[in-house]
Image: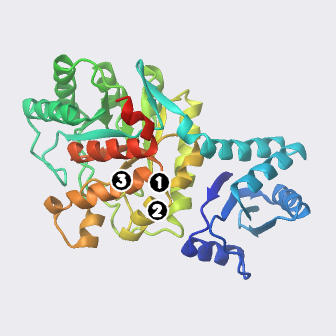
Amino acid sequence: MTIQIVNISYHDVFKRYGGKYNIFRDLYEKDLLGLEIRNIEQELSEKVRRIFLDNKEICYSVKNENNSSDFLALGSFSVLKDLSKIVLSAGNEDLGYKISKVFGNIRNYDQKYFKIDSLIYPLTNSYVMGILNVTPDSFSDGGKYFNTDDAVRHAIEMIDEGADFIDIGGESTRPGSEKVETDEELRRVIPVIEKLISKRPGTIISIDTTKSAVAKEALNSGAKIVNDISGGTFDKNILNVVSEFKAAMVIMHIKGTPKVMQNNPFYEDVVSEVYDFLSEKAEEAEKYGIKNLFIDPGIGFGKRVEDNFELVKRLNEFKSIGYPILIGMSRKSFLGKTLGNNIDERENATTVAETIAVNNGARIVRTHNVKNAAEAKKIINFVNNPEKFFND
């Protein structure tokens, strides 16, 4: 069972949900939200439906093939939040608690913070994660920083430009890329991590890997975050490793594997499908005792151009999962296909897209151009917190 607050005030989203739930009336309102509960037991769905109808609120349900239902209630944030309390008081404590938690995750999103080592990062601000590909074949900068000294030099440049974190990867995950053996990936990334920390102690390093062995050696060498594009699905032991080191973890959505992910990907509803995956994998990570989580919808990883834009537009909906949102769109092909330009001409588009994503809930931007992202971050942070200008 998954609970999601849907921004149904978009005309296209309302139309899609109207088709799913057979909504034939014109109920559109500017700030209309939908409380959707997917894969709820049919008997419980009927009880919740009765509670909402008794309180004169609009709701719908459709039956699934697996003896479950999907349920949708429409209303404002405050109305739906209050009804969750009625569900709780009516005896459905577990469901009422879960619905209330989802609303709390959204309401308190900007009041939360995450902590890495002794550093506290409030979600009133956004942060920049600089990309460091120690690979010969990454789509944007493959081969540029394959040498350890070059890689470390570039990492220091990004730190000086304002990067809060450095994400180091030794295996290309561009569309069509082949897997890299564990020993080779270790050979690429570990010397970079060790040398960077020796030159810049205190640097917060993220290791971009799907392999538990690489994650373990990287964390043992000083990395603090594991960025797994598979969300812990390619190598289940990676969850044990992150838990053992009490590290932070980025859970990302991908459809397929890098080699085949762009071979005609298709979604009935990309937002709900990605949401369900991230929600499920976050719960799984929690069971391993991993508390410091970030969620990433995986822009460009098994997504069509329109899927990527839909995810950015509705990124706010992922707040209800309860963890900081990370986004990576830097120089990606969906921007190039939209504007008809090559990789070297996508910097402006990248900055615009990243700024929109932060405005829609992203709090960590993973990017190649740290200077641009850091400047955008500073402006956004002051727009959201203008009083800080006089204190900085």
Residue 1: percent from the left, percent from the top? 69, 51
Q: Is residue 203 left or right of residue 391?
A: left
Which residue is rendered at x = 53% and y = 29% of the image?
291
**Residue type of the residue flagged with mark 3:** Thr
Are circles 2 and 1 on residues that touch, CB within 8 Å? Answer: yes
Disc 3 to disc 2, C-alpha distance:
12 Å
Which residue is rendered at x = 48% and y = 49% of the image?
361
Which residue is rendered at x = 50% and y = 31% of the image?
113
Check residue 360 in the rendering and tell me which mark sits there, or answer none. Answer: 1
Residue 168: percent from the left, percent from the top? 25, 36
**Residue type of the residue flagged with mark 2:** Lys
**Residue type of the residue flagged with mark 1:** Asn
Q: Which residue is mark 2?
A: 313
Label 1 element class: loop
Instruction: Sort mark 1 into few (<14), some (14-19) or many (20+) by Cα contacts within 10 Å.
Output: some
For marks 3 and 2, give the one nearer the viewer.
3
In this rendering, is residue 79 above or below 163?
below
Which residue is rendered at x = 23% and y = 59% of the image?
348
Q: Which residue is mark 3?
A: 355
Label 3 element class: helix
Q: Is residue 233 visible?
A: no
Disc 2 to disc 1, C-alpha distance:
7 Å
Q: Which quadrant of the rendered structure holds the C terminus?
A: top left
Are circles 3 and 2 on residues that touch, CB within 8 Å? Answer: no
Disc 3 to disc 1, C-alpha distance:
9 Å
In this rendering, is residue 164 above or below 274?
above
When asked about the image quadrant of residue 49, the answer is bottom right
